[in-house]
Amino acid sequence: MDKHIVFDKALTKADQVVLESLARDIRHHRGKPATSNGKLDVDSGLGSESSGDEAACSLSQQDARQVLALKALRDAKSAKFEPTIVLSVDDCSSLIPSALDRYVLQPYIRHARKIVRHETDVVMVSHLLIYFTTLVPSALFLFRHFTYVHAVCHFIMQMYYVGTYTLMQHQHIHQRGILSKKYGIFDAVFPYILDPLMGHTWNGYFYHHVKHHHVEGNGPDDLSSTIRYQRDSVIDFLHYVGRFYFLIWLDLPLYFLRKNRPALALRAAASEWATYTFYYCMTRLVGTKATLFVYILPFLMLRIGLMVGNWGQHAFVDQDEPDSDFRSSITVIDVASNRFCFNDGYHTSHHLNPLRHWRDHPISFLEQKHTYAREGALVFHNIDFLMITFRLMRKDYEHLAKCMVPVGEDQMNLSMDERMRYLKRLTRRFSEAEIASKFRKAL
């Protein structure tokens, strides 16, 4: 069923490699030559070679070569090293005049590599420059001279930035910074400026995501767990979003208290209420309308976005092993998640190792591809987490089945109808008795 695989021309180099590898596996399993889906010719790889152990061995060798090539792009000591400069394209130098590349871009890259914690992450400096030269001045000007036209344009800009910024902060909170130690003070301070502008409360993302979600892993004590919900039900989804939207300010401190972590409970509550107090002060002392557009609307929108995304990330949960990271989260190979959001689509890889650098996720996936297959992990392509949630609300399992990339023999043997029934089974809510039985360690 490799005919359903679509190779978007905007995929990152790494995603192209991963998807081609999975397509080769499917062709090898079917024992047929490579085909084209009409969108983009796929490297024939080993599709036309003999089947059996020899072909399987060669297939593994090809994956190994691809892994080495991706590692070279990631290795600052390699002649093939390619730092990420901007997210929209892979090779900036080829798109600009040689003089501009030599006298502007290359000096910028050399300097930025010294600023960031990982030399691959020049893009972090690029985005900080973008935010501090556009978003911050725009907000300041709105407070000084408010107009509705400017306010609406500013809000649109915030919504355009927020996905990429949130996943940049995702890297920041897991690795306790994105800049080198020399710039540690700025690294610690800039989130207090930018987080509220993007809809985040101060440190709220850190306490909820790192200190809570990754501890519980979508288990029964996870406040953002999906297991108690029917994941294709609009009513259940609204309940899920509403609980987080209106009560997370209370639920998260209470969670830490239940876990006998009073210091974290106090800090989580303090960070949340300090942000609300800041909003109130800005409204009273500076300007109500500007505060609404600059801080409050992004806050309200982000809270919805976070839960819509998390629902898609953990909508498909295995009934037999719901506590497995392979079977309670998914991998998504698409442009929105991986090109513009720092490989956020590799969610299973992230749960397996939350400290893994974002550029390493595709490499790790290829290295553990057979483990993913053996464990029954789910991989999708040409769809992001938000659209997965949307398709589930419509119960559009046909579209989801076409976006599914089967890994392992069991999945590859499924017909399209069987894929649909399989995915539907994985969205069933767990009863409290099932939770007590299958999450014994957590409980």
Image (cartoon, rainbow, N blue to C red):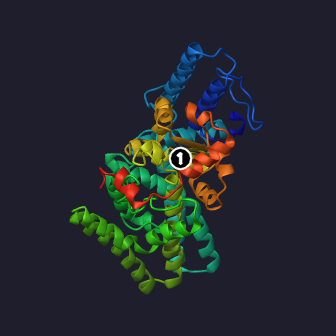
Residue 90 appears in the figure: yes
Depth check: give the residue in front, 292 or 303: 303
Q: Please determine whether, in this image, residue 122 is positioned above or below residue 385.
A: above
Residue type at the position of mark 1: Gly
Crowding at label 1, few (<14), some or many (≥20) Cα neighbours within 10 Å?
many
Residue at coordinates 61% horizontally, 45% vertically from top-left? 334
Q: Position of residue 237 (x, y in %)?
A: 53, 66
Q: Looking at the image, which residue sits at the far right?
A: 38
Q: Position of residue 302 (x, y in %)?
A: 51, 66
**Location of residue 409 (image quadrant):** top right
Q: Quick one: quadrant of the C terminus?
A: bottom left
Question: Which residue carries the number 1 mark?
Answer: 345
Residue 403 appears in the figure: no
Q: Quick one: quadrant of the N terminus?
A: top right
Q: Which element type, helix, strand or loop, lies under badge 1?
A: loop
Q: Is residue 154 left or right of residue 6?
A: left
Q: Please determine whether, in this image, residue 283 is positioned above or below residue 79.
A: below
